[in-house]
Amino acid sequence: MSIGIGGAGSKLASLMDAEQATIVNVSQSELDKVEAGSKILAVAHSTRGQFNGAGKDPNVGRAAHASICNKLCELIKGDMVFTSSGGGTGNGISSRLLDSVAEQDEISLNDKTVFGFLLPYVERESSEFVQNTVDFLMGPVSRAIDSGNTGNIMLFSNKLKFEGRIAEHDYNTMIAGSLNNFLSIPHKGDQMELIDGHVDHEDFRVYLSKPYFNHFCQFEYSADKPFGDLLKENVSQLLLPPEQPIEAMFLLEVPSRDEATSFYDILDYFAEDHVTPSYGVVLNPELEKPVLTLSLLYSRKPKELVDDFCQQVERITQKKLKKTINQFVTLEERRLNVEEEVRKIEEEDDSGRSVLEVLGRLQKLR
Ligand SMILES: Nc1nc2c(ncn2[C@@H]2O[C@H](COP(=O)(O)OP(=O)(O)OP(=O)(O)O)[C@@H](O)[C@H]2O)c(=O)[nH]1
Ligand SMILES: [Mg+2]
């Protein structure tokens, strides 16, 4: 089951499994737009947000959180929460939710919540979305990570959506599809013939409960290329790029038993960084080539993530500044034109005095 908070979060949760999804919003009309098994309306004392959402103001979401606080805390146990980091509803409600997670003494492994945050693409999205995201990462996300009380955190990015000009629904489907690929690792271990290693449901649950960022991807595996190069080419564009992993997990599906031992190359690659992945190798005769589903857990201070954001903002600010300077130059040209206009008036003036002469006298009087 998954819980979606705000517009983007609700759409993602619904795509993961509409019947099982619970969606949360401050606006009934926003709730009506998305299909879900269960819908929760969060109400603030003020009437702001009731019709169109929080209008990018996280204060509205934060205020509304109080009305659903207990219900939501109970609901997220052992489940997945999706929200955008930029919108007012998702950001505001999730901020309070993350704080309540951080304040608890210890959360048992089975009750840990996995969070999926959808980050804006700085180059194309509004400054409010970016500022809300910076506040979100520096505040509640940072505190929740420090508490060690969250499960994995997935940082989805809208960069590819904008750069690839992908329709919203298609992009959401890509995100949900790629997450489902990762989540299917233990099921495939059950359903397909196991050749080597093993990732069972319990191992998977333990992996999900670790408070690190999770980057997952799936690609055709070839032992002909160094694994590092292959990985570089195939990291997911739907998520922020991964850092040096602390832990890893993979499932290698091979069409025939002959290719099964190629997984040793992957283990060798990770051994160089002292990472010993959990893994399974299964036989999938329906495939033509081996397919690898890989997840990397990495740790990163939210401050560093924010620094990346700020660098992008800085680049854009520089570009805007350049544009402003160009505009200023245009204004200069206009001023010169005004001087010319004065000359024209002077020529046309039939009083016998030049305008510049009059101006000169006025200056002497001063
Ligand atoms: N990929 C994707 N991004 C979305 C979608 N809807 C909104 N976003 C992004 O999410 C951010 C805006 O957040 P929303 O989820 O719309 O906002 P909200 O939580 O409903 O909050 P308010 O609308 O302010 O009440 C921006 O970065 C949007 O680009 C979606 O369906 N898919
Ligand atoms: Mg909204």
Image (cartoon, rainbow, N blue to C red):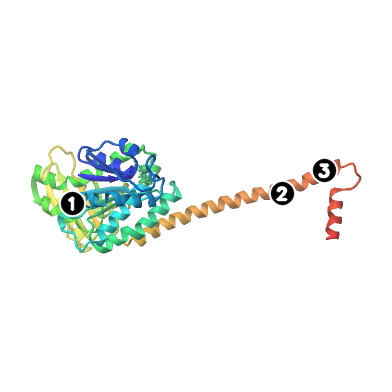
Nearer-the-camera pick, 224 or 306: 306
- Mark 3 falls on what kind of element? helix
Which numbered marker is on residue 335? 2
Residue type at mark 1 is Gly
Q: Quadrant of the C terminus?
A: bottom right
Residue wearing tag 3: 345
For the point 32% across and 37% down, which residue is it? 170
Ligand 2 found in image quarter = top left
Which numbered marker is on residue 88? none
Q: Is residue 6 left or right of residue 338?
A: left
Q: Is residue 350 left or right of residue 229?
A: right
Residue 353, position in %: x, y? Answer: 90, 47
- Mark 2 falls on what kind of element? helix
Residue type at mark 3 is Ile
Residue wearing tag 1: 78
Proximity of marks 1 and 3: CB atoms separated by less than 8 Å: no
Proximity of marks 3 and 2: CB atoms separated by less than 8 Å: no
- Mark 1 falls on what kind of element? loop
Residue 91, position in %: x, y? Answer: 35, 51
For the point 36% across and 37% down, which residue is it? 167
Residue 13, position in %: x, y? Answer: 26, 42
For the point 60% across and 50% down, which residue is it? 326
Q: Nearer the viewer, mark 1 or mark 2?
A: 1
Q: Is residue 163 left or right of residue 21?
A: right
Q: Farthest residue toward the right?
A: 352
